[in-house]
Image (cartoon, rainbow, N blue to C red):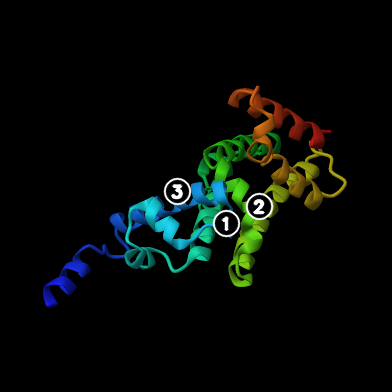
């Protein structure tokens, strides 16, 4: 019995190491596919365990609950979006027009990289407990606020015209989720075409 207990400890990586992160990402990706196929509410932890090949007892070492998985999925989208506004290549752009263009291109790319996850955000985030949903909504608002700051700078320099910068920033964030939300009806467009058309349409709404 002592030997088995020691063995169980050995297969569990420490929570701050690469193997733990790798296993957690494996769970997130497999769970995302199940959520997309069956729906979040209809997917059980046992099905996630089977899909990942991780025994259900060990599964709870890597994640706390099904809600925790959904939260981590949505966090995976928000992390690069929030970090985008700290990147030197974005911060260093003084021209608000070019800065907005750069942000738009990056956010569109993010939508391509995390298409399923973005769809889950809009479809299933309501399933999160209020505590976790509050965090998700705050992060979403953070992205909107940073875009609004660029719009305000453009207004001050008289290169943008917006009746309401907050409303416009919200519309831009929603527009940039177009491809993940409507991809079933946009199969004829290449990634480059989607990028160009979205950028053109967004810029058209704010340019003087």
Residue assigned mark 2: 123
Residue assigned mark 3: 29
Q: Quadrant of residue 196?
A: top right
Q: Residue at x 47, y 53 (%)?
A: 31
Q: Which residue is situated farthest in the left direction here?
A: 3
Q: Mark 2 or mark 3, which has the lower sequence index?
A: 3
Q: Which residue is situated farthest in the bottom direction here?
A: 2
Q: Mark 2 or mark 1, which has the lower sequence index?
A: 1
Residue assigned mark 1: 40
Front position among marks 2 and 1: 1
| Residue 168 spot, x, y in % from top left | 79, 46
Q: Secondary structure at mark 3?
A: helix
| Residue 81 spot, x, y in % from top left | 57, 48
Q: Quadrant of residue 108?
A: top right
Dot 1, crowdedness within 10 Å: few (<14), some or many (≥20)? many
Q: Foreground: 176 or 65? A: 65
Q: Secondary structure at mark 1?
A: loop
Q: Residue at x 55, y 46 (%)?
A: 37
Q: Foreground: 205 or 13? A: 13
Q: Are marks 2 and 1 in contact (CB under 8 Å)?
A: yes
Q: Mark 3 or mark 1, which has the lower sequence index?
A: 3
Q: Residue at x 69, y 47 (%)?
A: 147
Q: Residue at x 64, y 29 (%)?
A: 195
Residue 48 makes an appearance in the image: yes
Q: Is residue 57 left or right of residue 159?
A: left
């Amino acid at each position: 019995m002592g030997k088995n207990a020691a063995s169980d400890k050995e297969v569990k990586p420490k929570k701050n190491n690469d193997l733990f992160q790798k296993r957690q990402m494996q769970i997130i990706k497999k769970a995302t596919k199940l959520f997309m196929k069956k729906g979040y509410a209809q997917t059980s932890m046992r099905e996630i365990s089977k899909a990942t090949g991780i025994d259900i007892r060990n599964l709870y070492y890597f994640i706390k609950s099904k809600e925790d998985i959904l939260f981590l999925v949505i966090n995976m989208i928000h992390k690069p979006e929030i970090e985008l506004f700290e990147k030197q290549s974005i911060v260093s752009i003084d021209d608000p027009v070019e800065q907005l263009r750069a942000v738009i291109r990056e956010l569109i790319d993010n939508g391509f990289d995390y298409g399923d996850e973005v769809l889950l955000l809009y479809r299933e985030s309501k399933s999160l407990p209020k505590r976790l949903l509050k965090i998700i909504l705050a992060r979403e608002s953070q992205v909107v606020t940073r875009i609004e700051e660029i719009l305000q700078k453009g207004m001050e320099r008289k290169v943008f015209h917006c009746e309401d910068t907050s409303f416009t920033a919200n519309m831009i964030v929603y527009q940039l989720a177009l491809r993940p939300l409507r991809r079933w009806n946009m199969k004829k467009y290449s990634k480059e075409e989607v990028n160009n058309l979205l950028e053109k349409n967004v810029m058209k709404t704010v340019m003087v």
